[in-house]
Image (cartoon, coloured by chain):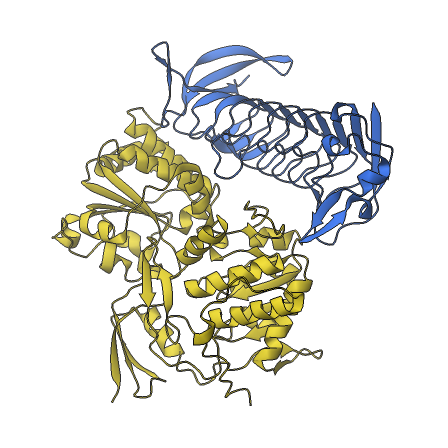
């Protein structure tokens, strides 16, 4: 395994589009070649080396390449986007599109991330120690095929639009979420360990949601059908089982309608 | 002899009334009377008479004052500033014609700018919902001729579109709606008792910000399921009764406005409204329409979607392709995140309509305003370039709220030496090409340019 370490040297005046910061782009390159990789600041194409000092060469393949960014990337977009293997660790915050369109590998952000992290994700692991803003693991505008696979774990809280139009994969938010969870989803699992303001599973066709906290405003299209015990993220809880969204279209399997499931932790 | 010009389009709201009659002075320089228009439209035409209208660009001086400069200097400054900027933001276009919107597209491409319009703080979320869920819409003519149930959801046409109800939605007698208002059932869904709500047969006064839940309740009821006793502050029985009214309509028309697009959820509210429209089509005919604000705010959506593939928030900084993702490439977000370093405000007033913080961020960089009149943005700008008023002294194509194109007339001659938006942008584009030693890809109607006659310059 080869580790490439980037140390931020300059804060971009606008925002630096670090779409080259992926194990796929770094693989097979020397430190000098990596420093010459492109990135946009506005309409000008700059080099990674203008914002980071690069030490260490990339591995032979993406899977052999680990990237460590030793510092704050609050003004660097697209870190680890479209990556297929290897790992990226950021010892600080990151901006938008972290792990967007990601297919494999591992991203660990030790600070906070901005919006659109894990957008259209297809595989791999995305771990954020801090908070995320909006559109976690959601679909790109106008695409009805959202996140397809992989795992996103946000240890802090998140904003709105979690897993919009999701088809597969898992999103775990360990604290609170504002509104719109799994809107338009047709699969996948969302686990929220904190509270949600509302609009959980609106227009949802299929898939599972677990809420361990409270939902302030429940959608009228969800109906309680019973109580179940289930294991979630390594712990067992008793849940109230709701099905919905009853206002949305639903497919049939073996003559039975298939609804989306909302498991809301039962009051003790 | 004053002249009466008939069939004039009104450059105010999204209704784009095209039945206005304007009486102008013999020399076509003064508006004397305006017939048929609402009070706001009438005043818009009379504004053109204002003798204090700016006739020359004004540039901010080092001491903070504004000084008049020739158009050539202003064009040069704008071209150089936009070329030097890493990422300029061009915003506005609520109140100009499609010719101008098309011309600015070439400037935006040349300068690697982000091209945005007033939809970004208005009906932008409707676009996102339309991307996600389609747009089962119709024209206002169809609404007038067919709709017997009209739903106003989060909009107040009595104030925002004063002639909408009389021309299209409530009062007019249409082909299948010959009894006019008598034949129409009007539902208003609004947390406030607006003047439209007072006019409606049924007013559902929902809790503010809970439109999504109410749409969900309507859809759940339509599919025959039960709902809680109260949803969004509305009793179950009222929801069921309203759903029955919509279901039993011959043609149900849903108009929605800012109450849906700019409360929590934004595009999801519209998305759900579109789903409701689709569901209602299982029972009857139903259509939905955005109550677009300005007379040609549907224009940039049409023009730029044709030019670049996206209707708003178009990031052209890559030079190879357009990128659009509101939340990232939308004006207010770009400003708040300091992602732009030059601001051009055209035919809109960012100074008045943006929240104060983004304006403060934008003011750190060159701030250019192109507007026929003085406004809040022009007064804080570094450069203010006056142009002719589209729809009053400049003709052009506009798109009504239902995306129907209408050719607007000019009723006045226009101030001498003052260019139209299209002429000005063409000049700026030409100057940019000169500066970068490139060939213009296209210049519109160069031989017809009325500029420069520059009487005012000398």
Decide which of B43, A224 is in the foreground and name it: B43
Q: Residue at x 85, y 37 (%)?
A: A31
Q: Quadrant of the C terminus of chain B?
A: bottom right
Q: Is B205 positioned to the left or the right of B263 in the image?
A: left
Image position, residue B79 (x, y; %): 62, 68
Quadrant position of the N terminus of chain B in the picture = bottom left
The picture quadrant where one finds residue B158 is bottom left
Q: Is residue B126 above or below residue B446?
A: above
User: How far across and down, in percent of the image, does residue A159 sit?
Assistant: 58, 37
Query: What shade does chain A have?
Result: blue
- Against A146, is B185 above or below? below
- Is residue B59 rendered to the left or right of residue A142? right
Q: Nearer the viewer, residue A240 or B272?
A: B272
In front of the other: B453 or A102: B453
Estimate the x, y position of residue A161 in percent, counting from the top left: 53, 35
Task: State whether residue A115 appears in this view.
Answer: yes
Q: Is residue B248 left or right of residue B262?
A: left
User: Quadrant of the rendered structure where residue B156 is?
Assistant: bottom left
User: In the image, residue B353 lies at what x, y percent?
Assistant: 51, 61
In the picture as drawn, the residue positioned furthest to the right comes out as: A55
Q: Is residue A62 left or right of residue B106?
A: right
> Can you say whether B403 is above or below B208 in the image?
below
Q: Residue at x 30, y 62 (%)?
A: B162
Chain shown in yellow: B
Residue lying at 50% horizontally and 51% vertically, measured from the top left: B308
* A160, B297: nearer the viewer: B297
Give above or below for A243 relative to B286: above
């Amino acid at each position: 395994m080869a580790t490439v370490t980037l140390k931020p040297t300059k804060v971009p005046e606008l925002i630096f589009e670090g779409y080259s910061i992926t194990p796929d782009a770094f693989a097979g390159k020397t430190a000098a070649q990596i420093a010459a990789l492109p990135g946009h600041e506005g309409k000008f194409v700059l080099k990674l080396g203008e914002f980071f000092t690069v030490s260490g060469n990339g591995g032979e393949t993406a899977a052999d390449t680990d990237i460590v960014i030793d510092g704050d990337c609050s003004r660097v977009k697209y870190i680890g986007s479209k990556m297929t293997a290897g790992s990226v660790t950021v010892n600080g915050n990151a901006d938008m599109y972290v792990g967007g369109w990601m297919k494999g590998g591992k991203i660990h952000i030790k600070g906070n991330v901005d919006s659109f992290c894990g957008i259209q994700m297809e595989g791999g692991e995305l771990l954020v120690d801090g908070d995320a803003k909006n559109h976690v693991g959601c679909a790109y505008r106008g695409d009805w095929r959202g996140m397809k696979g992989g795992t996103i774990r946000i240890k802090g809280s998140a904003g709105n639009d979690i897993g919009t139009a999701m088809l597969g994969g898992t999103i775990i938010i360990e604290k609170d979420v504002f509104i719109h969870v799994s809107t338009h989803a047709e699969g996948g699992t969302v686990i929220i360990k904190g509270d949600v303001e509302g609009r959980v599973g609106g227009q949802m066709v299929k898939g599972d949601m677990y809420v361990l906290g409270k939902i302030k405003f429940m959608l009228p299209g969800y109906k309680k059908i019973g109580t179940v015990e289930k294991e979630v993220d390594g712990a067992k809880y008793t849940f109230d089982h709701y099905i919905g969204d009853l206002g949305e279209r639903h497919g049939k399997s073996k003559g039975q309608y298939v609804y989306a499931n909302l498991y809301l932790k039962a009051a003790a | 002899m004053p002249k009466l010009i008939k069939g004039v389009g009104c450059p105010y709201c999204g209704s784009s009334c095209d039945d206005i009659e304007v009486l102008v002075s013999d020399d076509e320089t003064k508006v004397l009377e305006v017939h048929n228009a609402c009070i706001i439209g009438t005043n818009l035409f009379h504004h053109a008479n204002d003798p204090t209208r700016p006739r020359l660009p004004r540039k901010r001086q080092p001491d903070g004052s504004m000084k008049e400069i020739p158009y050539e200097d202003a064009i040069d400054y704008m071209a150089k500033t936009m070329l030097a900027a890493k990422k300029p933001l061009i915003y506005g276009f609520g109140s100009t014609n499609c010719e101008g919107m098309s011309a600015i597209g070439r400037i935006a491409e040349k300068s690697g700018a982000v091209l945005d319009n007033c939809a970004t703080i208005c009906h932008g979320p409707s676009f996102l919902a339309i991307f996600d869920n389609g747009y089962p819409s119709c024209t206002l003519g169809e609404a007038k001729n067919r709709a017997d149930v009209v739903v106003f959801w989060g909009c107040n046409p009595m104030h925002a579109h004063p002639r909408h109800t009389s021309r299209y939605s409530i009062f007019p007698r249409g082909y299948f709606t010959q009894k006019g208002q008598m034949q129409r059932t009007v539902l208003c869904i609004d947390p406030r008792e607006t003047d439209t709500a007072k006019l409606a047969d049924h007013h559902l006064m929902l809790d503010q910000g809970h439109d999504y839940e109410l749409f969900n309740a309507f859809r759940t009821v339509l599919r025959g399921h039960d709902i809680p006793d109260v949803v969004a502050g509305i009793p179950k029985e009222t929801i069921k009764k309203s759903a029955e009214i919509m279901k039993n309509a011959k043609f149900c028309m849903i108009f929605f406005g800012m109450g849906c697009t700019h409360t929590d959820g934004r595009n999801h509210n519209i998305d759900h409204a579109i789903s409701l429209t689709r569901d209602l089509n299982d029972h009857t005919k139903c259509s939905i329409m955005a109550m677009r604000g300005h007379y040609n705010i549907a224009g940039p959506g049409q023009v730029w979607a044709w030019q670049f593939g996206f209707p708003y928030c178009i990031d052209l900084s890559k030079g190879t392709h357009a990128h659009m993702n509101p939340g990232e490439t939308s004006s207010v977000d770009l400003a708040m995140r300091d992602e732009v370093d030059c601001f051009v405000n055209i035919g809109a007033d960012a100074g008045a309509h943006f929240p104060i913080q983004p304006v403060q961020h934008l003011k750190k960089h060159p701030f250019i305003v192109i507007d026929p009149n003085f406004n809040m943005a022009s007064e804080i700008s570094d450069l203010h370039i006056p142009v002719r008023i589209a729809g009053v002294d400049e003709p052009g194509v506009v798109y009504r709220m239902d995306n129907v194109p209408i050719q607007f007339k000019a009723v006045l001659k226009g101030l001498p030496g003052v260019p139209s938006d299209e002429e000005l942008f063409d000049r700026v584009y030409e100057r940019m090409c000169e500066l970068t030693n490139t060939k213009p890809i296209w210049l519109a109607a160069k031989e017809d340019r009325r500029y420069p006659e520059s009487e005012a310059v000398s």
